[in-house]
Image: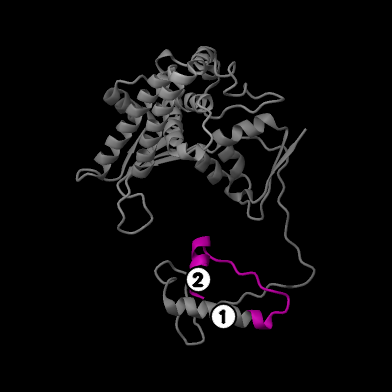
Amino acid sequence: ESIIVFDEGHNIDSVCIEALSVTINDRGLEQATRSLGRLSSEVSRIKQTDSQRLQQEYQNLVAGLIDQGLLDAPANDSTLASNALDPDVLQESVPGNIRRAEHFIQFMRKVVEHLKTRLRTVAGPNGGVQSETPLAFLHRMTNGTSLEAKPLRFAYSRLNSLLRTLQVSNLDDFNSLSDVADFATLLATYSEGVAKFAIIMEPNGSSIPGASDPCIQLSCLDASLAIAPVFKRFGTVAITSGTLSPIDLYPKLLQFEPCISESFQMSAFRPCIRPLVITRGSDQLAVSTKFEDRNDLGVVRNYGNMLVELCSVIPDGVVAFFTSYSYMESLISEW
């Protein structure tokens, strides 16, 4: 028996959505291409030195994913369900056209090349920000590559199987290829029915002004997909936060029925809050955290001086809140 506690749970829906969202860019696709080249070379080497290992993997793939140990069984008292694949997929055998290692590598090359083509289109003169449903994106992929949709659902588990068979030690080198396989699996799994994902293509997904970095993002729209296996596996799950408000919103976002829902009032043994609104610094320059004003050197300097002066007269310590982590780091570096 276990109790799962999510502290600072006010952003749990964002964390769940981020966990099932995948972003693909040019650098990642180039790295994925290099990874496929390495896998191809390693497969050729294993064929000459230990072909029985690849043959054994092929036989395992004829069985279902659960039978060969690549994925756990559906959620029960002892296991955690997969939140990426449907239950019927877990019981199926891997499609025959990707069971052979060399066939699967060629299969993934087509997927990578298609994504590169879509990125070039987005970054081209007739491109721009575009949005598609998973079904529309999958339809264009299957038409453009002559690939079937079903094997795409097995891309992630098939890649894991191949990496295990080849006994790859440094898995970090294959993160970009894993992202592509994850993208393909989620795309094919959730392409039908109510839209739980959206495809967003941007010509400039970089946070650096002026930098060209086209990207394709598979954005999760349903936070409950990631948290559902946790609710199924564990009998007691607690979500707490000092800012879990409105408290009735979170069961709707995560699609669960709370057994107990309580909101506690903050109390203090003495009056300890005195509101004070400051609009100007000691040099009479206006101070503001508005986006267009917050990086002004005068504003940065006045906030620093103000914080130092308050700390010098408040005996019990000071807690300073910033509008964001990035703004806090920027101010500290300037100070």
Q: Position of residue 99 (x, y in %)?
A: 44, 16
How crowded pointer 1 is (Cα within 10 Å; few <14, some 14-19, many 20+) is rated as: few
Q: Please provide the residue range marked out in magenta.
A: 311-335
In the picture as drawn, the residue positioned furthest to the right comes out as: 269
Task: Using the numbered discs, state the Cα–Cα distance from disc 2 to disc 1 in whole angstroms.
Answer: 16 Å
In the picture as drawn, the residue positioned furthest to the bottom comes out as: 283
Q: Is residue 321 covered in magenta?
A: yes
Is 301 situated left or right of 29 in this image?
right
Q: Is residue 41 covered in magenta?
A: no
Instruction: Give the residue at x 66% y 35%.
Output: 257
Residue 333 marker: 2
> Where is residue 181, by image quadrant?
top left
- In the image shown, does 112 or 170 lie closer to the viewer? 170
**Element on which disc 2 rests:** helix
Query: Would residue 43 be visible to someone looking at this image?
Result: yes
Q: Position of residue 74 (x, y in %)?
A: 62, 22
- In the image shown, does 45 or 100 lie closer to the viewer? 45
Question: Which residue is labeled 1 in the image?
Answer: 306
- In the image shown, does 99 or 87 lie closer to the viewer? 99
Q: Position of residue 76 (x, y in %)?
A: 68, 23
**Element on which disc 1 rests:** helix
- In the image shown, does 155 or 43 lie closer to the viewer? 43
State which mark lies toward you, 2 or 1.
2
Instruction: Give the residue at x 69% y 79%.
Output: 314
Give the answer, above or below, for where 187 lies relative to 73.
below
Instruction: Give the residue at x 26% y 40%.
Output: 120
Quarter of the rendering occupied by the N terminus: top right
Which kind of residue does numbered mark 2 sit on? Ser
In the picture as drawn, the residue positioned furthest to the left comes out as: 125
Query: Would residue 153 be visible to someone looking at this image?
Result: no
Give whichever of discs 2 and 1 has the lower sequence position. Answer: 1
Residue 267 marker: none
